[in-house]
């Protein structure tokens, strides 16, 4: 193994790879490590480049500049090639979401059926907000209270009852919110109003997505107890978001 002088870059013989796995890494020049490994959050960003010299065996060169993000040599000045990778998954997920026209076509037959019932205008207009307000403040409010009792109550019996009721209550709230969203869309379509453009619709979609994440977190508590704090903070944030969502809904109802 070649000796590494203090202050000089660490050079390890390797094969040039054209791989998207070349990520910023953290290592020490005093110990050997695999070519690819993940970086710790507190690590100094290092640049991993591949240098292929004609006529010689290629070397993987890892350098740690004094200012890792600012001191970047111009490509081609010393034969180095900087490789970047972009994950397309978020774009694919966004592209998979249905647009307003798709939702209108799916809900079209049901909307026509609702219109044929000749329901009172006030019921169509305020039925969804009234139902969702009951779910938010009754089920969501009490479920949040039970969550805090689980964390802070010193009564063993009270904590056991809260642990039993808290997930059931908030799971039911999630179902009502998901079904209620279809009611809100139907209400807008029967009134020939635009959908998905309002802050009320956007905050509702974000809230349902966060509730899905919140529902998964308890299954990971056993392996990572620290996620309990994340669960509590996320749950409180979701409830605050739904209060904003309700305010936008009230504004939307009064404006139409």
Image: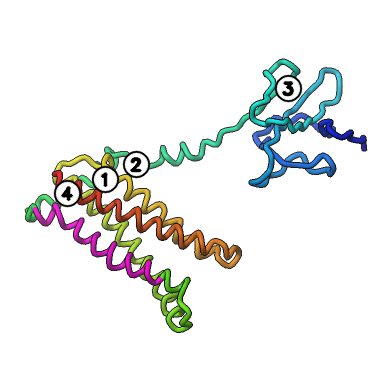
Q: Residue at x 48, y 82 (%)?
A: 156
Magenta range:
122-146
- Which of the colour schemes (rainbow, by chain, secondary structure, one colour) is used? rainbow
Circle on res. 106:
1
Mark before the other along the chain sequence, 2 or 3: 3
230 above or below 3? below
Residue 109 seen in render: no
Mark before the other along the chain sequence, 3 or 1: 3
Give how far apart the Cα atoms at labels 3 and 1 are: 54 Å
Give how far apart the Cα atoms at labels 1 and 2 are: 10 Å
Q: Quadrant of the N terminus?
A: top right
Circle on res. 131:
none
Mark before the other along the chain sequence, 4 or 2: 2
- Label 1: few (<14), some (14–19) or many (≥20) C-alpha neighbours in 10 Å: few
Between disc 2 and disc 3, the foreground one is 3
Coordinates of residue 245 in the picture (x, y in percent): 29, 51
Of 100 and 66, nearer the camera is 66
Q: Which residue is mark 4?
A: 253
Between disc 4 and disc 1, the foreground one is 4
Callout 1–callout 2 Cβ contact below 8 Å: yes
Q: Does the magenta stretch mainly form a helix, a strand or a loop?
A: helix
Circle on res. 80:
3
Callout 4–callout 3 Cβ contact below 8 Å: no
């Amino acid at each position: 193994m070649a000796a590494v002088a203090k202050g000089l870059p660490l050079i390890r013989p390797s094969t040039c790879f054209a791989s998207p796995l070349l990520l910023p890494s953290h290592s020490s020049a005093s110990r050997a490590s695999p070519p690819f490994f993940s970086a710790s959050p507190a690590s100094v960003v290092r640049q991993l480049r591949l240098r292929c010299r004609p006529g010689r065996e290629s070397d993987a060169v890892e350098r740690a500049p004094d200012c890792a993000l600012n001191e970047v040599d111009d490509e081609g000045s010393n034969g180095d090639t900087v490789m970047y990778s972009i994950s397309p998954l978020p774009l694919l997920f966004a592209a998979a979401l249905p647009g307003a026209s798709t939702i209108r076509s799916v809900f079209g037959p049901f909307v026509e059926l609702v219109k044929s019932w000749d329901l009172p205008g006030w019921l169509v207009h305020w039925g969804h907000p009234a139902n969702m307000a009951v779910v938010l403040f009754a089920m969501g409010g009490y479920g949040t209270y039970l969550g805090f009792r689980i964390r802070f109550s010193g009564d063993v019996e009270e904590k056991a009852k809260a642990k039993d009721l808290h997930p059931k209550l908030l799971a039911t709230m999630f179902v009502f919110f998901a079904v209620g969203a279809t009611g809100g869309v139907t209400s807008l379509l029967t009134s020939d109003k635009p959908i998905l453009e309002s802050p009320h619709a956007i905050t509702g979609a974000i809230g349902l997505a966060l509730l899905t994440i919140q529902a998964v977190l308890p299954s990971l508590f056993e392996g990572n107890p620290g996620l309990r704090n994340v669960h509590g903070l996320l749950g409180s944030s979701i409830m605050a978001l739904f209060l904003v969502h309700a305010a936008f809904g009230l504004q939307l109802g009064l404006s139409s």
